[in-house]
Amino acid sequence: MFQVAGGRALPVARLLAPRGGARVESVRGRKSRSDPPARSKEGRIKVPPPVDPVEMVVLKERFTEYQLIMRALRLEFKEEVLRKKYEEETGSLAEERARQEAQEHQILMAWNDAENLRMLKLRQLRVQKETEEAEHMKQEVILQREQEMQTFIQEKEQEILQLQEEAKNFITLENLDERIEAALDNPRNYNYAIDREGRVVRRTVLN
């Protein structure tokens, strides 16, 4: 016979028989915080259990021994981790890592050389283009200066030709008498008045 909750005895056949559905046993719940204390517990004062001094000494020794054991285990695990790390850095794993790093370094150096070559070509093209543009600008400046110089020379030549034409009418010692006789034969009166349109409206008579 088996004992179950509630203190009732159930036969073995009933326990081993197939169950047709879930069977829920009634269980007494806990008291809530607002429930008053039981009548049998009213006025009871909790007193801590007495401590045996001998047992306290034994527990203290065992706790100290436990702390020492745990500290030794922690140091042992730490030493093992450091040993594995050292073996990885200096042992066979370190050789494999060094080989991988060397291979990766070669790959990166090859990529770096290819990138430097590409940048060199781009820089050469840029410098060549800048040189051609500077040369083109220089030629344009030279042509512009030559054109300005040609224009300046032509203007000065025109001024010289105009001065030469005007110099033919200058009064010199050779034609001074002729110019005086011509001025006396053809007198001109500049004492006159003009209107707003520039027409002569009044002229004084020469004496």
Image: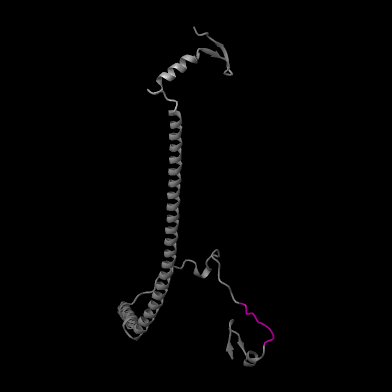
Residue at image x 67%, y 90%?
Answer: 18
Q: How is the image coloured?
A: one colour
| Residue 185 position within the rendered picture, expressed as x and y whole percent measured from the top left | 48, 15
- Residue 204 within the magenta-colored segment of the rendering: no
**Based on the displayed image, in which of its 4 quarters is residue 74 positioned?**
bottom left
Q: Is residue 104 above or below residue 44?
A: below
Q: Residue furthest right?
A: 20
**Quarter of the image containing the N terminus?**
bottom right
| Residue 177 position within the rendered picture, expressed as x and y whole percent measured from the top left | 41, 18
| Residue 134 position within the rendered picture, expressed as x and y whole percent measured from the top left | 42, 55
Q: Is residue 32 above or below residue 9?
A: above
| Left or right placement of residue 27 versus residue 62 in this view | right
Is residue 62 in view? no
**Based on the displayed image, in which of its 4 quarters is residue 180 positioned?**
top left
Foreground: 164 or 127? 164
Is residue 90 in view? yes
Q: Is residue 34 above or below residue 172?
A: below
Residue at image x 62%, y 77%?
Answer: 26
| Residue 2 position within the rendered picture, expressed as x and y whole percent measured from the top left | 58, 89
> In the rendered structure, which segment of residues is drawn in magenta?
19-26
The number of discs equals 0
Q: Residue furthest bottom?
A: 13
Residue at image x 41%, y 77%?
Answer: 107
| Left or right placement of residue 68 versus residue 15 in this view | left
Chief secondary structure of the magenta span? loop
